[in-house]
Amino acid sequence: MSAVGVAGATLDAQQNGKVFLGALLGVAQKACEIARCLRSNAAFGSNLVNQKADREKGETVEQDFVSIADIFIQCVVKHDLEMLFPDLRGRVLGEETEDFQSSSSSTTLTICIQPTEEETVDQLRSLLGDHMDASVKEIAAVAHRKPDIVPVSCIPADTKALNINLSQTALWIDPIDGTSSYIKGNSTPRTEGIAEENGTLSTVTFLLGAFDTCTGTPFCGVVAQPFAPSVEQESPHCARYFWGISAVGDLPSDHDVSSHKYWGELSNTDAIGADASFRDSTLTVVHSKSEKREVVQAMQSLGGTMSVGGAGYKLLVVARKLAESFVLTLPTTYPWDTCGPHAIIRAMGGSVVDTTGNHIVYSVQNSEAHEKGIVASLSVELSKSILSLL
């Protein structure tokens, strides 16, 4: 995948949004490489997974896990973005802590990117053991590779409305959304589509979203599928990257920021715009398996419904137009789950609100669950219809 290297250079506080988006796509590529590398190792198993404590996973979740991939990918993304954009230091926020305990050795390490590739290899080897040596060397090489800025040719170079003030920008990362599916390793389908992808590795996503710290508005997001269906016979899956960016505006509800909003998917050579692989939906509402029965029944009055795994994936299928909306009335999603896909949906003219109709906003200080749930849709009218039934 072609990209423009930055050779370790840092970028200014007043940054062109096109370059900023390219950097987010670049770190997403590295994240997907690491996720696939670790998952492909035959030794990947229980010693690479920790179960979260109740206070970390939330009261309504029965089981939640963190893998070595979650923590290492988050460390790589934070390292790269803070290197490229020093003004972001302290405001690249993630779901995971940096501590990981190997069940095979009872060793606990605080994982971070070391000064040299060799030191990173040594750190990971001490945690994972020699049987993971090939994967350790490969992911350390990816981690220490200079970050790229992916070209986004569909956005005009002089779009000043997309300029970003990095001093009032922060990001939320979910390095592996759908860790349970990532661990189980259900096969990837050969054809794309919500029915085919549901319950497989295709629902695993990498989520990255930038928001304005003054207004709480998400304005730039990337959602990647490391294990998307592949049409190539020699490979069971490929990576796909969906993105969206829009002018910050004055309020979270300010979607109509003139024509300064762009979205699309990353192809093999470029970040292409508009509806390259987005399609019309025949499904009205996606929801979680744990959603209240009465809510699902109410949504069925609007059209077809389906239970789908992964918060990030459910939001992505709305952006991909595989479903018209995502409805959740339970407090089981967090800022890292929603910020990236929210930014894409906003760029497409849609909205993400809570079940009272208030727009979801983001803060550096608040990492709590969205207590009043979420309603996401590209259609303002459909959102109103859904809210009237809740």
Image (tube, helix red, strand yellow):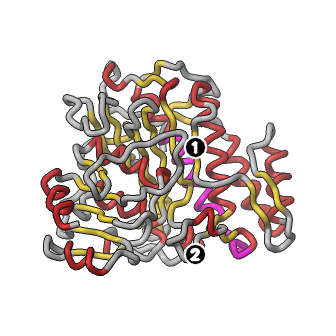
Residue at 33% across, 19% down: 160
Q: Depth check: 279 or 51 in front?
A: 51
Residue at 48% across, 57% down: 369
Q: How many marks?
A: 2
In the image, which residues are magenta?
25-46
Place of residue 293 in the rendered image (x, y in percent of width and height, measured from the top left): 30, 81
Place of residue 186 in the rendered image (x, y in percent of width and height, measured from the top left): 51, 78
* Crowd band around label 2 with a 10 angstrom C-alpha radius: few (<14), some (14–19), many (20+): few
Q: Earlier in the sequence, mark 2 or mark 1?
A: 2
Residue at 64% across, 28% down: 8
Q: Is residue 190 visible?
A: no
- Residue 93 — which label? 1
* Crowd band around label 1 with a 10 angstrom C-alpha radius: few (<14), some (14–19), many (20+): many
Magenta stretch encompasses residue 34: yes
Helix, strand or loop under label 2: loop
Q: Depth check: 127 or 331 in front?
A: 331
Place of residue 233 in the rendered image (x, y in percent of width and height, measured from the top left): 44, 70
For residue 387, side relative to residue 177 (left or right): left
Q: Amino acid at mark 2?
A: Gln
Magenta stretch encompasses residue 176: no
- Residue 101: which quarter of the image? bottom right
- The C terminus: image quadrant: bottom left
The overriding secondary structure of the stretch rendered in magenta is helix
As measured in the structure, the alpha-carbon distance from the residue carrying label 2 to the one carrying label 1 is 23 Å
- Residue 63 — which label? 2
For residue 167, side relative to residue 242 (left or right): right
Place of residue 327 in the rendered image (x, y in percent of width and height, measured from the top left): 30, 64
Q: Is residue 82 visible?
A: yes
124 versus 84 height, above or below: below
Q: Amino acid at mark 1?
A: Leu
299 versus 31 height, above or below: below
